[in-house]
């Protein structure tokens, strides 16, 4: 068992290490964003070199290549990389091209090999990238095999995810993430969660439209009115943290009207019972929640919570007890992490909302054809699946016909909204966007984009 994390860690995040919306320090110049970054092909081409070829990107999960020789391809624009599990169990990355004459080594998206052999001239490479043989040595002549291995790229892992950076001078992954991010995320044991939804498809909008959309709650009233029953955007209680290139927003979980003095315990319990429609992982928590809440229910079915007890605190207790009993170590997480929605953006494109036992990842990347008006979005929901529930693990769905995959309601609403926004952004006379104060994470994200584009990151 991991030693319990200091209870004050998340409190520090929400107090000393964090700021409120008013204190975020973004003036009006930070809240203006040029539209060319969404629609200009020239901007997209520079973005490719200044951002995508220089940053760490999540390219898969460790359990996708569990055995020695297992590999998967990661494609970025016209660049192809292989992520390989070596005989020593290390995960390495290589350019998917033979250093002899540049022929592609692997044409599939994944596979398992004892070694990689180029089909052109039969040069072969070990799982660590070293050249171990050549076809017709008598025609090759003297060659120092140690100098002709596969071109290696930086690869590392964190939280069960595989990250790759095409930059030969990349700083170590954990340095890039930063100490705060590592400390905040490690106790969730993300590596133990399994995908229960895994979908990838092309979307008719810029990748930054997707990143923007999932970093603010201002659009809930307009796009997700159904969520208003269980989510209240309260700027006085949301806290923000901006560790280096990344950002984190913490919104304390409370059901609607929980701060209303006339709000009854009965209404709070009913709202929590409705949560699985928004947060699927709560379904497994509800039996324990009902058991705990029953202690405060009278013969007429009315709930009365004494001081220090609320639906929120009972949900936190139920979450901790349920996950612990089913085998997930949550001893390093605070009560707030049992319930509160923590939204992370790991620059450039790894957006995650996480609470104990579940997380949801939005991973948009530029479209391989370079069109700034298109992207590939990859949406995955992960949950803790106790032993015996492995049947609920989802395989990747590649959607080829737009609009045919049935996303859950809130995600479907975002899916439909983002292409509409892109259509508006294409209007030539619209030169800049003005962000609202609540969109401080969007403002921070674009300030980081500006730094990378200027070569100052």
Image: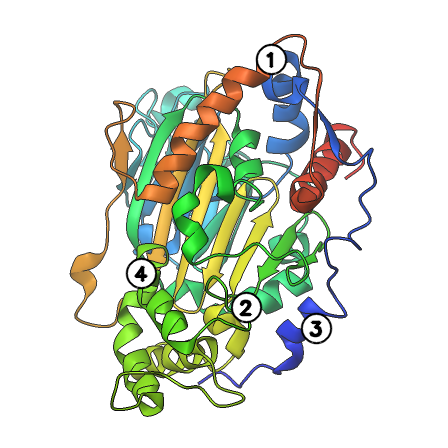
Label 4 residue SS: helix
Could you give the CA–CA distance between mark 4 and mark 2, rounded to whole angstroms? 23 Å
Q: Is residue 140 above or below residue 437?
A: above
Mark 3 or mark 1, which has the lower sequence index? 3
Q: Which residue is mark 4?
A: 276
**Disc 2 element:** loop
x and y, in percent, of residue 55 in the image: 62, 40
Spatial CA distance of label 2 from label 3 is 27 Å
- 2 or 3: tag closer to the N-terminus: 3
Q: Which mark is residue 254?
A: none
Residue 300 in the image: above or below residue 443: below
Q: Where 240 falls versus 309 (above or below)?
A: above
Residue hosting label 3:
12
Instruction: Judge the density around disc 2: few (<14), some (14-19), many (≥20) Cα neighbours within 10 Å.
Output: few
Task: Report x, y in % for residue 353.
Answer: 48, 55
Report crowding for label 1: few under 14, some 14 to 19, many 20 or more residues within 10 A (C-alpha). some
Query: Pointer 1: what residue?
Result: 41
Dot in front, 4 or 2: 2
The disc label shown at residue 260, or none: 2
Disc 4 to disc 3, C-alpha distance: 29 Å
- The one nearer the camera, 129 or 217, is 217
* Residue 68 seen anywhere in this rendered image of the structure: no
Label whose residue precedes the other's in the sequence (2 or 1)? 1
């Amino acid at each position: 068992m991991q030693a319990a994390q200091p209870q004050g860690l998340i409190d520090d995040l929400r107090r000393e290490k964090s700021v409120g919306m008013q204190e975020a320090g973004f003036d009006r110049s930070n809240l203006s964003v040029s539209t060319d970054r969404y629609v200009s092909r020239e901007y997209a081409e520079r973005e490719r070199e200044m951002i995508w070829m220089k940053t760490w990107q999540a390219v898969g999960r460790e359990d996708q290549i569990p055995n020695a020789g297992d590999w998967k391809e990661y494609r970025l624009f016209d660049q192809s990389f292989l992520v390989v599990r070596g005989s020593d169990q290390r995960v390495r990355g290589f350019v998917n091209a033979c250093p002899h004459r540049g022929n592609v080594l692997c044409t599939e998206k994944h596979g398992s090999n004892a070694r990689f052999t180029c089909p052109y001239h039969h040069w072969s490479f070990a799982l660590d990238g070293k050249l171990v043989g050549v076809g017709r040595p008598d025609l090759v002549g003297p060659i120092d095999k140690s100098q002709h291995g596969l071109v290696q790229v930086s690869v590392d892992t964190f939280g069960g995810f595989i990250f790759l950076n095409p930059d030969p001078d990349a700083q170590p992954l954990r340095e890039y993430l930063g100490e705060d991010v590592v400390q905040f995320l490690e106790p969730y044991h993300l590596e133990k969660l399994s995908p229960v939804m895994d979908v990838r498809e092309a979307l008719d909008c810029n990748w930054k439209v997707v990143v923007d959309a999932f970093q603010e709650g201002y659009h809930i009233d307009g796009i997700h009115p159904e969520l208003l029953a269980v989510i209240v955007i309260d700027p006085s209680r949301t806290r923000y943290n901006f560790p280096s290139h990344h950002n984190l927003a913490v919104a304390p979980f409370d059901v609607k009207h929980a701060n209303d003095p006339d709000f009854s315990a009965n209404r709070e319990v009913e709202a929590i019972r409705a949560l699985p429609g928004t947060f699927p992982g709560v379904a497994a928590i509800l039996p324990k929640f009902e058991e705990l809440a029953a202690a405060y229910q009278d013969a007429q079915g009315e709930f009365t919570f004494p001081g220090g007890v609320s639906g929120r605190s009972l949900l936190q207790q139920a979450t901790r007890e349920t996950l612990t009993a089913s085998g997930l170590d949550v001893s390093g997480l605070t009560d707030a992490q049992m319930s509160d929605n923590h939204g992370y953006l790991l620059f450039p494109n790894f957006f995650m909302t996480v609470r104990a036992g579940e997380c949801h990842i939005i991973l948009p990347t530029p479209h391989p054809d370079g069109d700034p008006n298109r992207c590939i979005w990859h949406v995955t929901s992960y949950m803790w699946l106790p032993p015996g529930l492995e049947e609920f693990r989802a395989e990747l769905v590649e959607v080829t016909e737009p609009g045919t995959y049935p996303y859950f309601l809130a995600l479907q609403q975002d899916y439909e909204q983002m292409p509409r926004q892109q259509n508006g952004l294409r209007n030539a006379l619209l030169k800049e966007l003005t962000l609202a104060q609540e969109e401080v994470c969007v403002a921070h994200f674009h300030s980081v984009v500006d730094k990378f584009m200027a070569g100052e990151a």
